[in-house]
Amino acid sequence: MNKFILEGVNLWYGDFQALKGIDMEIPANKITAFIGPSGCGKSTLIKSLNRMNDLIEGCKVSGNILLDGESINGDTDVNALRKRVGMVFQKPNPFPMSVFDNIAYGPRTHGVKSKLALGEIVERSLRDAAIWDEVKDRLKKSALGLSGGQQQRLCIARALSVQPDVLLMDEPTSALDPISTAKIEELVITLKKHYTIVIVTHNMQQATRISNRTGFFLLGELVEFGKTNKLFSLPKDKRTEDYITGRFG
Amino acid sequence: MMRRFDKQLAELGNMLLEMSALAERSISLAARALIKRDAGLAEEVIRIEEEVNLKEREVEALCLKLLLQQQPVAKDLRLISSVLKIITDLERIGDQAADISGIVIAMDGGVSAGQSDYIPQMGAAVIKMVSESMDAFVKKDAKLARAVIEYDDVVDGLFDSVKNDLIELIRADKANGGQAIDLLMAAKYFERIGDHACNIAEWVAYSVTGKRKGKKGK
């Protein structure tokens, strides 16, 4: 089953066309990786999936993006959309508040007031993000005191707290050491049971380790999209082959 | 400018060719040693086997280093993993040439009871297979690799002919039995060398096409 269907998606930043006629189907409960050189449009595309690009002045989108068969363009309730489609960024960005409040922030915004309910959500989210055991004794302490890897898992827990369907991750491990990276990768693999995950990564080996599908982008075009094993062992397009084997340009 | 990794891959290819040249030489010498009953040539084959083994270690070390350092994907990964497999077959070819030579040395000096003309033909046929599988490797020619695999039928046919000749040899005089059995074993080693050449050709085809297929698409 497909979570997202993209039909002829074009995106402009002013006069510059950042995405050109993207057609793709992103399967539910799978990990889809976007790869490509800097400036190829992969981050732009991932941000289009929960309309984060709306915040950029001069950004114009055409074509169709369907989430569970329904268009997210036009007058979609963007807040509701972003509740369903959460996002984790490259640099861990915890709020300058306690661990507990970081996780409770989203549910509170969406109207959850009961202390008991919030407590349950916080524990569940932290457990799902595989960080509960490390922070359960310091829930009231500032999240800024956590290590980079812990902060990133906290941010994943924060994204999970509003029970989204989809988790978008833009280079979630590029600022982390190998051990924290391995933890996040393990986590992402367990999360796909309940969530659809789309990840932008510059780390080719990471894409091969965790993703089921990979899309290769170049100059705003989706050059090749298919099963990860296939794309990394026998790419169809010469541009894909040149990029992944480091012979690009 | 050539990238360092591309230079290393080129070096890997050259090392593989050196190893296969040694293996071909040992088959050729073993065949001549058997035909001429020349223990000196046979000793030379056994010496070359050592070189083949050393070369295998060298190529293997470079493959492992490249896997570690470059974490290759796509055609680079196929190339390096194919080379890792190919050297095992080349090493076995070296062993079998040495086994043939061992038979020649054990026969030492005894009056030749007879021959099968098909044995030199087998030697020539398997050398052709090894040499063409390496041509296919250099030219990245999957079609040539497939032709090598098909050619194994010719070697199998020659083995049957050798067997028939040797049956005749025993029928002519039971005293020829010992020598006939030695020759049959040598022929079997040539036939096995043909199988190894097939394996090499299969890996060459995989390296080029990304598809793993055995003889006749199996």
Image: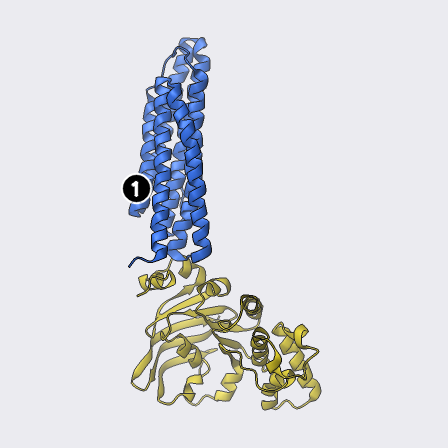
Residue drawn at (44%, 56%) of the image: B69
Could you tell whether A83 is left or right of B2 in the image? right
User: Mark 1 highlights which residue?
Assistant: B135
Residue B163 on image: x %, y %: 40, 21
Q: Is residue B149 above or below residue B100?
A: below
State the count of labels: 1
Q: Quadrant of the C terminus of chain B?
A: top left
Q: Is residue B213 above or below residue A17?
A: above
Residue B186 on image: x %, y %: 42, 24
Q: A39 or B140: which is nearer to us?
A: A39
Residue drawn at (43%, 90%) of the image: A75
Chosen colour scheme: by chain
Q: A7 or A35: which is nearer to us?
A: A35
The colour applied to the residues of chain B in this rendering is: blue
Chain letter, yellow? A
Q: Is residue B78 visible?
A: yes
Res A122 → quadrant: bottom right
Graded by Cα atoms within 10 Å as few (under 14), some (14 to 19) or many (20 or more), the crowding at tag 1 reads: some
